[in-house]
Amino acid sequence: MRLPKIRAIAFLVTIMRDNYFLTTLEHYLRSHFARANLRRQPRTAPIVLIQCVEDYFHFALFGKITEGLRACGPLRVDQFSLRSLRHGSSLALRSLLWNSIDRNWLSDWKWRRLYGAYADRTAYRATGWLAPWTALTLWWAAWRLWRALKTLDDLAQLTVRGILIGDLIIDSYIRFKPAPALVLDDLYLLVIIRQSLKDIGKAARYFRRHRPALLLTSYATYIQHGIPARVAVQQGIPVRAFSNLQDFVTEITRDNLSNTRDGKNYKRDFSTLSDTMSRLTAAERQLNDRLNGRVDAATSYMKTSAYGRTSGKECDVGGMPVIFLHDFYDSVHLYRWICFHDFWSWACFTIDTLQAAQISFAVKPHPNQIADSSEVMNRLSKKYQGLNVIPADVTNDQLIRSGMACAVTVYGTVASEMAFMGIPTISCGDNPHVSFEFCHTARTREDYAKLLRNCHGLSGTQAEARRESCIFYYMHNLHLDRDQQGLKDKIMELRRRLFFIESTPPPQEIVEAAADFASGPEISAFCSSLYGLMQEDAVRRGSGL
């Protein structure tokens, strides 16, 4: 009986060593980035607030950007620790215990120390001790909000201190519970609401007292990222997010709280451009490459292409709509509006509607879904006996050649890919294709059901759908000036080397990737522009520089 205990002790020691203290690699990185950042900046220097994101891609990205900003003039760098929710902790006491050992204030301290290579101080932490009366008040406020919720729509529209947080809470619940659908009377929802109130209070207090001139964030989704970004926007502080694969950076504003590109005017804006034929030719060439199995920049997050090598399995979907499932645990509220608040409810509604209309259909799982989504697929197959599930290795071009009638999605990129092959799409939420006719977008569940029942009679021609798909691809992925394209190329190469990888690279590779990212005029010009924005903010506040 001693051997298991010894192994458990050794496992705990390994966790503490790796998660609570800087590794050899991290000591190297801290020393390297510290040498490039000067300290003892004047108290009047503008402040940039950055996320303490626990990965080397964002560490290198924010490190080089702050280095570039410091080259432009005086600068103070604050960081905030965003870790608050632990994935899966509500599922079992054992999960809670191990997650608490794995990620806690000591692991936060380790990453804050690493970011301390170029950050001057910690602005605030999402977790941390509160006075007993303050903690009780927070729980009571969260309890009252939670018990007042009657529907998911009520939750989605939840606003606190003038800041919409309901969509962030829903997505956080689905991701961190994890669960494919939200349950209103789940105590874990109360935990997330309470944490949201805590995050709003801490962010608002910091922004009000210290007034940073700029917030740099990774994403604008989930409560950890979205709440600080929205509080900053409310207080007039510029926010930039670095998670959009179509751009180098996204400006978060009152009108655009998402880190995704807004495509509502793509079709109109393309009509104002010159030399449209050459632009369409470039888009057609790249779309052809994607449909031949090449993973391009826009789909570089995918491990495998949905149009890769043809499977040897037979697939008969002739005349059928094909439901292209999303990763059930992905962020649902990426865009301005949506008809369903989770992908499980959407999938069930779609299947129920098609079955009631006696329309044969097929279901295709997301090609790069996480392991938890595979379990949800099993649950879906049990709920709907005899469900026609397409094998994961069957490619989309096989479905097209088999004669599928249309594609069904919430907001997936599959819409433009299908249009290129003359196949229409039904969607039920705001999406990048919303301005195009090839994507029949419903704004209500009733309209969505009508589209599903009419899936064999959707309007549009194959030639027009193909042309519109090229317009979309150009506007979504290629419509950049030379400077923007240069910046995008820089960050995509950094992602390739430090983010879309299976294992941690050696320290020299991280340093080299960061140096390559910062080399050339593109990043220097971007940092100079950002610093000018910070100067303007200081002038508006009358502090000067």
Image (spheres, rainbow, N blue to C red):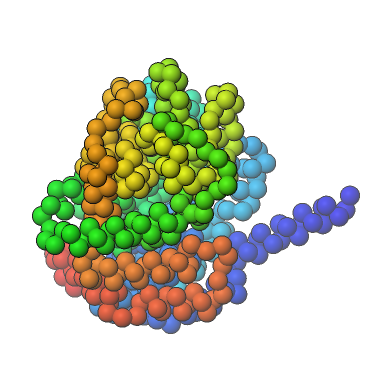
Q: Is residue 270 visible?
A: yes
Q: Quadrant of residue 419?
A: top left
Q: Residue at x 13, y 62 (%)?
A: 275
Q: Is residue 541 above or below residue 357?
A: below
Residue drawn at x 28%, y 58% as measured from the top left: 283
Left or right relative to 109: residue 465: left
In the image, what residue occupies the spot 62% across and 42% down? 96
Rendered position, 365 above or below 78: above
Q: Position of residue 21 (x, y in %)?
A: 60, 66
User: Residue 154 location in percent, x, y?
Assistant: 34, 27
Q: Where residue 191 sits in the image (x, y, percent)?
A: 48, 36
* In the foreground, 185 or 275: 275
Q: Is residue 110 left or right of residue 357?
A: right
Tell me residue 107's x, y (percent): 56, 59
Q: Residue at x 53, y 30 (%)?
A: 388
Q: Nearer the viewer, residue 208 or 278?
A: 278
